Amino acid sequence: MTSGNRLAVLGCAVLVATTAAGCASATKAVTGGSGNGPITMGTVNTTTVLDPAGAYDSGSWLLFDNVFQSLLKFPEGATTPQPDAAKSCAFTGSDALTYECTMRDGLKFSNGHPLTNEDAVFSVQRMLKIKDASGPATLLSTIKSVETKGDTGVVIHLKTPDAVLPAKLASAAGSIVDHQVFPADHLLSNDKIVGSGPYKIDSIEDLAGNDSHALGKVALSANSQYGGDAKLQNNKFVVRFYNSADDIKTALDKGDIDLVDNNSLDPAVSAKMETDQQAGKGDYKVAEGDSGESRYLAFNTKDSTVGNQAVRQAVAQLIDRKALAGNAYAETVQPLYSLIPAGITGHNTSFFDKYQDPDVNKAKRYLAGAKLQTPVPIKLNITSSSSRSGDREINEIKRELEDGGLFQVTVQQEKDFKKYQDGWSSGSYQAYLVSWTPDYPDPDDFVSPLLVDGGVFHTGWDDPKISQQLVPDSIKQTDRTAGGNYTQVQNMIADQAPLIPLFQSKAFYVSRNNITGVETTVDTTGVFRLWDIGRTKK
């Protein structure tokens, strides 16, 4: 999923209200802070859509994981999906083309409607039918058809074997929606959203100072109809969305929020807070852990300049990941030399193996071999909503690429992430910085969505050997701990460089000293479990 943006987006604050039972209401929006009210979290992972069929971004999926149930889920610290709305799921038959689930009894949506196998089937069919350009339908592309079986059965028929299907269904792409509320062929408006997860939506406000109708605040409360396994440590939770890391720091200092989600603060601020905590001082706690969130430099390979492989290889030769991690991110990230990050099966160091350390002379030879005159002009696009380092990241990359006079870089900034996403989707950009947060802890999630048919970042690059041979063969493997074809895929990416990996984030969650449970959310599943967060009583 795109981050900072899993593809994410951003007037005065406008309260969206509805009179539908169990859905968002026109109640007064609750405020956060360090008092006895709802626990409030701040994030820069902004979004505009709360319908699971139309959102593939970190901001939306944060809410989906807490408002909806799926057939399967990832428990804390687990990499193997376990039953959620289903009580059992398994592949049947020797060809691995049929996947069957049996639903749990007694589940309900927050409006009181029963959750049945009809809803589970409808949700998959709807996702594939709508196939929204900003949605996660691509994750379910191996599904041929889905049908009910009796009163509780769900049968999924696949086009080709897909051993990753359980993980995909456990992600927010598998969110089950109420077939009596959600339209079958278009998205539902945010004010009518209803789910069966631990929380229901009470109210929604738009983000002030932005014309894209991005969410500014979502107030949640415990769903009294919830029939799952989660044990809530709070009854009310507010998620507040901010335009920048500076805005979040201000809100934290003012007491408007209780905690900050993964890497929404300026990296230098996070590092200082962690140092203070280790020294036994300060008002905040920092929970640090592994993260699969990765940052890439993407190219529009249909462009007349960066469509030239030699140009992309020269850029790859000049990128100094260690300097980027230190100068722009205060060592709160680690250099990444492959498409698949460390900690995920299949990770290697393909870019370091090919390019070694930054070298101007080697980069010059790539350009000279293609008979290109220097400096080569490049327009590099970025959005402030996806870079928590402010201008430090883009300035460092510009400096590295202009080293030796090989490139002349023009930086173009877009404040609005939705417009930024539209820019790369339409092919308007040459090169642009993007982030990716895994939907599930499997190497396929860094290959299929990013590479096949140009990928979600619309690079225009597609290698038939990868999309038609290596990927289909890899997702057939039932042993997901095996490397498979992913080494070969990453070596091909290093050579052709449609995407250049820059760094892999470390997870930093900052909370007030009286907030508990944050450390349990720091794992490789990518699921932020709001129900685990509590507050110590005064």
Image (cartoon, rainbow, N blue to C red):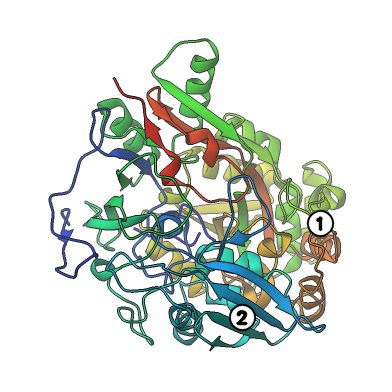
> Depth check: 280 or 90 in front?
90
Residue at 40%, 22% (x, y): give it.
513
Name the side, left or right, on which 15 lies relative to 472: left
The type of residue carrying mark 1 is Thr
The type of residue carrying mark 2 is Ser
> Depth check: 131 or 193 in front?
193
Image: 185 above or below 365? below
Place of residue 390 in the rendered image (x, y in percent of width and height, measured from the top left): 45, 39
Quadrant of the frame with the C terminus:
top left
Residue underneath mark 1 = 481
On the image, which quarter does residue 480 sit in?
bottom right
| One can see residue 306 in this view | no
Place of residue 41 in the rendered image (x, y in percent of width and height, measured from the top left): 35, 40
Label 2 crowd bin: few (<14), some (14–19), many (20+), radius 10 Å? some
Image: 47 above or below 469? above
Residue underneath mark 2 = 141
Report how many numbered discs are placed on residues in the image: 2
Residue at 54%, 61% (x, y): give it.
1
| One can see residue 155 in this view | yes
Place of residue 172 in the rendered image (x, y in percent of width and height, measured from the top left): 50, 64
